[in-house]
Amino acid sequence: MEMDRRTFFKGMVFAAAATGVAATAGCSSQPKPRGADADPRPLPIPPLEQGTLQGNVRRFELTAQEGEYEIVPGTNTKTWGFNGPFLGPTLYMRRGETIEMTVRNELPEPTVVHWHGLHLPATADGGPALMFGPGETWSPTWTVDQPAATCWYHPHPHEKSALHAYRGLAGGLIIDDDDSAFSGLPNDYGVDDIPVIIKDANFTDDGQFDEDNGWLGDTVLVNGITKPRFEPTTQRLRLRVLNGTTMRYLHLTLGVPFTVVATDQGFLENPVEVDGVLLSSGERVEIVVDLEPGKKLMLRSDALPDDGGLTDKDAVEEFQVHRKFDLLEIAAPPETVPASPALASTLVPFDAPTSATVTREFRLNGMEINEKTMDMSRVDEVIDHEGPEIWRVTNENSAMLHNFHIHNARFAVQGVEDGDVEFTSGWHDTIAVPPLATVSLLVEFGYYPDPTTAYMYHCHMLNHEDKGMMGQFVVVKPGEKPALAPPR
Ligand code: C2O
Ligand code: CU
Ligand code: CU
């Protein structure tokens, strides 16, 4: 067993997992993905949308709309997207700027958009109470007050987040700052700094999304298409990978070691070399890989290390933890590209507080958290102070995968009990909670006191969320009581 390079379970490293470099694509019992026999197509790069900048104010316009897209070669699938038929542009913003966002709903039903990973006022956060109808617009505003990170945006309508995201409403969001132009770190969007948005889907015989059986898709898409290929022009690539699937955990491998530089909420203190990364739904990771002339690579999702912590045979089947997928072919770079300078060995100092005065417990069980399902009129937790808290999150199910996401927050993993895992540093906003394990999270919240509007915490396996595995918290001034405004 290699002692240095292991599977990076985002915050957690599987202690005993042999990560193995993958053999062949798929195994015989695995259904063949759509488009598997077609030739590879060039990887689409979502347009980088910088909005319009006036002084310190950056304005964006997003329209949620219907369309059609050739996800699988030769088939037009009815889709939803932002400012286009499918998925959305990558939004670019910098720390310190004020954002004025206008979102227009041209869909046939109400929706709302959540800025996943951002720290902002609850009225801008895009929870289900803020849904708006067809023909309406919503104009949230906030100031970017967090370090550089790869975040994303997706709908959050009550009981329909999975469906809206599955139809294609999802896009990347890059927060940049003045402190992250590290030596050797690629940052030319679309050239050597590449968004990799992973979704999965099932299709009906006539090539439409199968919405009755879509929660673990047999076909995996990157930036909206099957079987993509990227032709690099540089020796080093930075991949900003988003697990945008509804329910599928990914075990990312490249067949060669690669370097993790950032987790959900930004840069690590030091780059970490790994053989694989486990990424649950909603999580992001930024990786850097050095290419060799004449050698192409395949970004794959392999069987989950340690079966994701599942021991029950049926659950192993149900969550498809043995499935393998080819995600993205990376062609060999030209022989002539110059080698990149050494990657900085120190990135952003990790300054997590070491203690907190308030501890809360969250028990994930079935589709409930602490024996309750989501109720938009109920406030589950009130945070009336500015400092950090410890949130202890337990997956009480031996036969179910769950993860945990907190809005308007970042957290460090302090410890894991009853799980065969270790953890490493790094800031997260979403984390896998292995079966029967408890993770202790040191959480820092954005402090925008407002008793009228709630933030969410939930399992980010989106159909668990839609079935009620979600709760609400409000952030208020000391001693203030919540007073939720009626849904919009
Ligand atoms: Cu990306 Cu409330 O979630
Ligand atoms: Cu979120
Ligand atoms: Cu869950």
Image: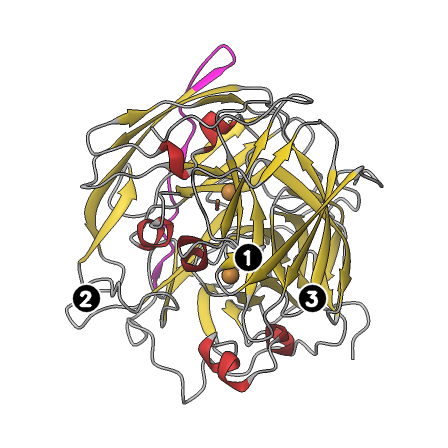
Q: Which residue is mark 2?
A: 207
- For discs 2 and 3, the disc positioned in front in the rendered view: 3
Q: In the rendered image, is residue 351 in sight?
A: no
> What element does badge 3 sit on?
loop
- Comes first in the chain, label 2 or label 3: 2
Query: In the image shown, does 44 or 126 lie closer to the viewer?
Result: 126
Dot 3 amino acid type: Ala
Q: Residues within 10 Å of mark 2 (few under 14, many from 20)?
A: some
Q: Which residue is mark 1?
A: 371
Dot 2 amino acid type: Gly
Q: Is mark 2 within 8 Å of ligand 1?
A: no
Return the mark for residue 1.
none
Number of marks in the rendered image: 3
Q: Which residue is mark 3?
A: 437
68 lies above or below 84: below
Q: Which residue does the image show at 36% across and 22% down from the upper left?
A: 139
Q: CA distance from mark 2 to mark 3?
A: 40 Å
Determine whether, in the image, residue 40 is placed left or right of residue 172: left
Q: Which residues are magenta?
A: 41-58
